[in-house]
Amino acid sequence: MLSKKRLIVSRIANKGRCFRCFATKSDVGEIEIPFSNGTTIKFETGKYARFADAACVANLGNTAILSTVVSKAKQSTASFLPLVVDYRQKAAAAGRIPTNFLRRELGPTEREILTSRLIDRSLRPLFPSNYFYDTQIVCNMLAVDATNPPETVAINAASAALALSDVPWNGPVGAVRVGQIDNEVIINPTRKDLQNSVLNLVVAATNRNLVAQHIVKGIEKLQKLHGKTKRVYETPPGLPQEIVDCINTLSSMKIREILSDYSHDKMSRDNAISDLRQTVLNQMRETEADVAQLQDCFNANLKSIFRDMIFEKEIRCDGRHLDDLRQIGCQVSLYEPLHGSAVFQRGQTQVLCTVAFDSADSALKMDTLTMLTSGIKEKSFFLHYEFPSYATGEVGRSGPAGRREAGHGALAERGLLPVVPQLPYTVRLTAERHKRKEFLPPLRVPLLRDRRGGAERAGGAARGGARSPGRAGAAACGAAAALHRQAYC
């Protein structure tokens, strides 16, 4: 029988890469947080996964999610945070057996991928900008009921696990689902409520948001009682100020010249910036500074100048004003044997879409856990998004859709679903992304005035080129053109 109080000795990395502190905390702890609708979310820690950096179980009703956090002690060679979030549904959590040949969980389903991305987007922005250690968050479904959806429970469990761990993180966050029935806002609606709700919104926020504030305060209280001291991690020293000034002097004027030349397209502008970057790096070789740091310094100066020029001139680097959209082109009925086809292009982003109609038997059947957690047994309308390697001029391996493709396809599908009527057959849309240097001539639409435009929206590009249009938006537009042309015309 383990004592409730013991000395927790964390791993200490050698060579000064990372130091983890000692802490004496009570192993097992729990806290309950009530909601206005009478439900309560409970956090428990210290019972499972003791070798992980932290573990927490979140319970809402009879739905329980175990979240664990592990971060390596050795810094990664990447210049970004290598964070991986895995959400896994277990058939045993619902008292079921998988119906595949092996009778066990196989690869991640689409719902698991989308939930993993939802958790990732809620947590990633709060990590320190200079924390480059491999980190993995795993959310396992322990139990699920027929009332409470598990997505927000998983976000809260992961938030609590990160707060309890020694991993540096500027959280915690709290997550709730918001519904609306008869003009009344409902927090954490049940699955039955969601069937009648006109709103299905997941909100994840820090303690500055009133909706999630009580959850965040509860996690902070649990952290004070049972959390570990945050580790001290080593960061490489920055460049001396004289080197930074030298890079800015060598590059600033030429960057402004390139960004002010509106005859450039995205490719030629990027090439000009890349040539300038290489020239500056060659001139800075004698400093013996780290090449990666020199590149980061150049890119930071590029981003600053790019944004400043937009505010100064109110013109983007491609000559568009703040309220101008890129030119849009569309072609339909490309191939006669198909039920519908279209090419949609905005700027240099191009999407080829097709639509196919089939019998109701061809509907997309959901797996057992997805049926239980979402209430959807099958889908008669769905969209598949593809992003082949040749779209960016690269060599890659063809295979099943990745996480990003699943996420963008689901976003485009949700954008089209409200305007698609109930049909007696199955509709499948495919959206394959391409690139094209020249603009398509047919059905050219003049530049439009975008009322939502603004300097902040225009300043999103950080690398000197015009900001790429939303992939999911382009896919949705192309799919809508293919679907409308053949199905309703």
Image: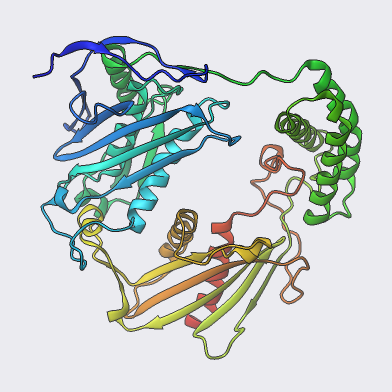
Apparent side of residue 56 relative to residue 479 in the rendered image (left or right): left
* Residue displayed at 38% across by 28% down: 173
Q: Quadrant of residue 383?
A: bottom left
Q: Nearer the viewer, residue 193 or 116?
A: 116
Position of the N terminus by quadrant:
top left
Q: Position of residue 236 (x, y in %)?
A: 63, 21
Apparent side of residue 141 relative to residue 401 in the rendered image (left or right): left
Q: Nearer the viewer, residue 50 or 109?
A: 50
From where the camera sits, is residue 187 visible? no
* Residue displayed at 86% across by 36% down: 282
Figure coloring:
rainbow
The residue furthest left is 1
Q: Position of residue 300 (x, y in %)?
A: 73, 31
Count of marks, rendered view = 0
* Residue displayed at 75% across by 45% down: 322
Is residue 394 shown above or below 170?
Answer: below
Is residue 434 shown above or below 145?
Answer: below
Is residue 437 shown above or below 87?
Answer: below
Q: Position of residue 483 (x, y in %)?
A: 50, 76
Q: Position of residue 377 (x, y in %)?
A: 23, 65
Q: Quadrant of residue 264?
A: bottom right
From where the camera sits, is residue 30 visible? yes
Is residue 337 shown above or below 199?
Answer: below
The residue furthest front is 15
